[in-house]
């Protein structure tokens, strides 16, 4: 049996880089394998600031899930689907990253959370979780990432502040002890 490993990625260590289409900047939180580029990652978690309406970068063979972290939100026009209005209160929105997509901002600049996995190799899910006090967080997946969006939280004995991300490998199904007051995003990744 492979032992679980935990890594904490502090908010000030995330890598800033231009969007694939050059239209803005993204903050890469984590990528696998380590050091992978935009063309050869297995999975990638990033945040982007979107300041103008326009097209999304196209990623062939990739599935993505988008969530609004800050700002009023945006309306997504994904080829083959009805327009989707995405705001901070919306559930994370999964869609194909190779489907032509454009966005119209609702009211000014937003920051989004973008999770991507290589189709046919991996699948992922994203959920928003609030913590106020102490309890347990049930997780499942070969890799689990917990991004602390607001507040502070202790997960499995590891302290996260706003913008920090815990990466847990070889997780399978388990429960982590959690305590604090925070809004988090839980990302679960597993082989297909």
Image (cartoon, rainbow, N blue to C red):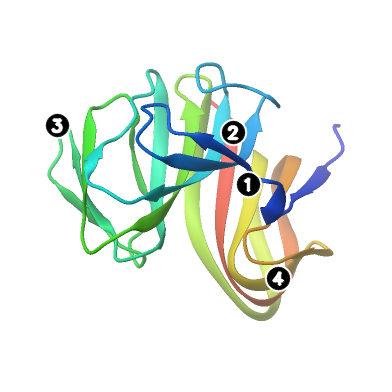
Q: How many marks?
A: 4
Q: Which residue is drawn at 31% across and 24% down?
A: 98
Vertical side of 179 occupied by 76: above or below: above
Q: Where is residue 52? Give x, y as percent.
A: 26, 48
Q: Name the residue under label 2.
A: 190
Find out whether the residues at labels 2 and 1 contact each other: C-beta distance under 8 Å. yes
Q: Earlier in the sequence, mark 1 or mark 4?
A: 1
Q: Do callouts 3 and 2 mark residues in contact (Cβ within 8 Å)? A: no
Cα–Cα gap, marks 3 and 4 = 40 Å
Q: Is residue 165 visible?
A: no
Q: In which quarter of the image is the N terminus?
A: top right
Dot 2 or dot 1: first in sequence order is 1
Q: Helix or strand or loop: what does disc 1 sit on? A: strand
| Residue labelled with disc 1 | 140
For marks 3 and 1, the one nearer the N-term is: 3
Structural distance between the alpha carbons of marks 2 and 1: 8 Å
Residue at label 3? 80
The kind of secondary structure element at disc 2 is strand
Mark 4 and mark 2 lie on one chain; the one further toward the N terminus is 4
Task: Identify the residue at horizontal 71%, vertical 27% (top origin).
Answer: 34
Q: Which mark is drawn over residue 153?
A: 4
Q: Quadrant of residue 58?
A: top left
Q: What element carries label 3?
A: loop
Q: Classify 10 Å Cα crowding around label 1: few (below 14), some (14-19), many (20 and above).
A: some
């Amino acid at each position: 049996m492979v032992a679980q490993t935990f890594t904490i990625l502090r908010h000030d260590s995330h890598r800033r880089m231009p969007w694939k289409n050059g239209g803005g900047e993204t903050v890469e939180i984590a990528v696998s394998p380590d050091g992978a580029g935009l063309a050869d990652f297995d999975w990638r978690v990033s945040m982007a600031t979107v300041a103008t309406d326009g097209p999304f970068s196209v990623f062939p063979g990739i599935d993505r899930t988008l969530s609004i972290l800050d700002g009023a939100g945006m309306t997504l026009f994904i080829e083959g689907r009805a327009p989707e209005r995405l705001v901070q209160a919306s559930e994370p929105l999964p869609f194909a990253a190779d489907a032509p997509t454009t966005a119209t901002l609702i009211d000014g600049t937003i920051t989004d959370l973008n999770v991507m996995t290589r189709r046919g190799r991996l699948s992922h899910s994203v959920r928003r979780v609030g913590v106020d006090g102490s309890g347990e967080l049930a997780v499942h997946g070969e890799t689990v990432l917990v991004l602390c969006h607001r507040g502070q939280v202790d997960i499995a004995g590891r302290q996260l502040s706003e913008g920090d991300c815990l990466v847990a490998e070889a997780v399978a199904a388990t429960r982590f002890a959690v305590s604090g007051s925070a809004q988090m995003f839980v990302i679960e990744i597993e082989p297909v």
